[in-house]
Amino acid sequence: MNRLRRTLLGALAAWLAKPLAALAAWNESAFGAKTPQDALKGIGAANPAPSKEIVIDAPQIAENGAVVPIEITSNIPGTSSIAVVLEKNPFPLAAKFDFGEGALPYVKLNVKMAETADVRVVASAGGRHYAATREIKVTIGGCGG
Amino acid sequence: MAGPMKMRATVAGGNTDVRVLMTHPMTTGQGGQALYFIQNVTVKHNGRTVIESEISQAVSRNPVFSFRLKGGAKGDTIEVSWLDNKGETNKIEAAVA
């Protein structure tokens, strides 16, 4: 109980200490999750259905795990968000993008991968969740930096 | 340290391609380094928020993102801003070319 109160007070103090501009949301429980399953639960997308309508363009072999380019397009109508899960990283959830009316469900980014692993992309549309995975082989891990 | 940003926004195939580069160490907290990374990236088109994102320390150092916005015309304003876990922010604004 005391611990809970301290945590809450700490969170409140941290919140108050932040400038107004710093109030953007960051899903601490999802990004702090240590398994892909917990990360997906954290973003409310547990058990996504497999979909071939999510296109993941990435190298089969990444020589440098510190910079692995991943390009994602969702062809699922009404896609409102795309999450990127690096299955074997210490904290698997790498990013989540929310697309408004004026944006296409497309993103390209560079990520760090600790080792050869599946990259799972979860797209959400109309309250349903879909996933596609792709394996990327990593010859030199990139999580030191 | 966090530093300047670069951005290019161009009309292509009826949409607007945005490519943005941020200068940030994005350190993971491993190997004696501090955990220091961008947490939020926001894209605005003519002042309207079109993409909001949350990212982790798994995004590479000096992050580069490409986004695609619906429609758009030369001269439109694109703004990309970020916020990191220390509360630092930066933003860049550019006209669509």
Image (cartoon, coloured by chain):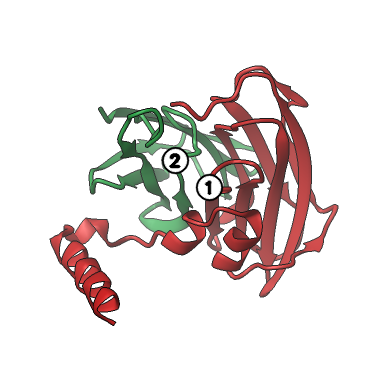
The quadrant of the rendering that contains the N terminus of chain A is bottom left
10 Å neighbourhood of mark 1: few (<14), some, or many (≥20)? many
Q: Identify the residue shown where x is 65% and y is 30%.
A: A115
Q: Which residue extends farthest right?
A: A52
Instruction: For chain A, give the colour.
Output: red
From the image, tell me which residue sits under label 2.
B57
* Displayed quadrant of residue A60: top right
Q: Inspect the image, locate mark 2, and give the three-letter code of the amino acid beneath it.
A: Gln
Secondary-structure class at tag 2:
loop
Is disc 2 on the same chain as disc 1? Answer: no
Residue A23 lies, in percent from the top left, at: 27, 62
Residue A33 lies, in percent from the top left, at: 52, 57
User: In the visual, does A100 lie left or right of A14?
Assistant: right
Residue A130 lies, in percent from the top left, at: 75, 62
- In the picture shown, does residue B26 fall above or below A125? above
* Displayed quadrant of residue B14: top right
Query: Which label number is shown at residue A110?
Result: none
Give the distance between the C-alpha atoms of the residues marked 1 and 2, in whole angstroms.
9 Å
Q: Inspect the image, locate mark 1, and give the three-letter code of the amino acid beneath it.
A: Phe
Can the viewer see residue B66?
A: yes
Labels 1 and 2 touching (C-beta < 8 A):
yes
Between B23 and A62, which is closer to the camera in this rendering?
Answer: A62
Instruction: For chain B, give the colour.
Output: green
Between B12 and B17, which is closer to the camera in this rendering?
Answer: B17
10 Å neighbourhood of mark 2: few (<14), some, or many (≥20)? many
Between A22 and A9, which is closer to the camera in this rendering?
Answer: A9
Query: Which label number is shown at residue A91?
Result: 1
Secondary-structure class at tag 1:
loop
